[in-house]
Amino acid sequence: MAVTVLGDRAERIGLWAGMRRRAENTRAGRSTVAVAAPAHTESSWELSERDAPNARETRAGGTVNSVDVALKEAMATEGAIGVALVDFTSGMTLGTLGSSHTFDLEVAAAGNTDLIRAKIRTMESLGLADTVEDILITLGRQYHLIRLLQSHTGRGLFLYLVLDKPRANLAMARHRLRTIESSLDI
């Protein structure tokens, strides 16, 4: 299992800026530096050299923060394959947990960011003064459950949980994500 969790909110903002600059640098042909994750994970980031000090991960046995606990709680859901905490304003994942052999949570999170943005635009076009609680995508063998966080500290974030359809209890998964949301402090 790969666990990726970023540090406090200020560090995440620095990382987002770094990731944006990385994309700009890549397009412009400038070099970037890779910041490797600890040995127990399978993830890494590329940041511009100026932003490398802003990256941090929670290490095994180190500081356990709310994001780490939330991801582990979500993975304890029967049938869970993977989970991510994502900022849909930037498309950046703030943390992931799950098997990287099943599928790429980063790619899935980016795609679901586009889905959420489209749904919010549609609601605005329709003049619906309401909020999206969650979105369910049912595939042949999987459920993809997206829970938009409603707390003041979670605005602009969503939890993305992928479940193995034959083993999952969808009602319990939705309940668990609501519970996780209420205890998540970002």
Image (spheres, grey):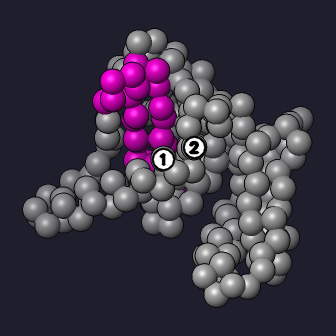
Mark 1 and 2 residues: CB-CB less than 8 Å, in contact? Answer: yes
User: How many tags in the picture?
Assistant: 2
Q: List the single residue furthest toward the left.
A: 126
Q: Is residue 48 magenta?
A: no
* Displayed quadrant of residue 155: bottom left
Which residue is tagged 1? Answer: 108
Q: Which residue is mark 2?
A: 104
Mark 1 nearby-residue class (10 Å; few <14, some 14–19, many ≥20): some
Q: Which residues are magenta?
A: 138-165
Vertical side of 104 occupied by 47: above or below: below
Residue at image position (25%, 56%) is: 119
Q: Amino acid under label 1?
A: Ala
Q: CA distance from mark 1 to mark 2?
A: 6 Å
82 and 128: which one is in front? 82
Figure check: 184 above or below 52: above
Residue 53 percent coordinates (x, y): 85, 70
Relative to 33, say whether 107 is above or below: above
What residue is at 39 percent from the left and 22 percent from the top?
141
The kind of secondary structure element at disc 2 is: loop
The residue depicted at 33 percent of the width and 61 percent of the height is 117
Q: Is residue 109 left or right of residue 165?
A: right
Place of residue 154 in the rendered image (x, y in percent of width and height, measured from the top left): 50, 54
Residue 101 appears at what percent x and percent y? 64, 33
Residue type at the position of mark 2:
Asp
- How far across and how far down the image is residue 110, in percent? 48, 56
- Secondary structure category for the residue under label 1: helix
Does the stretch in magenta take in 142?
yes
Q: Nearer the viewer, residue 117 or 99?
A: 99
Is residue 154 in view? no
Q: Is residue 56 left or right of residue 16?
A: right
Mark yes or no: residue 90 visible: yes
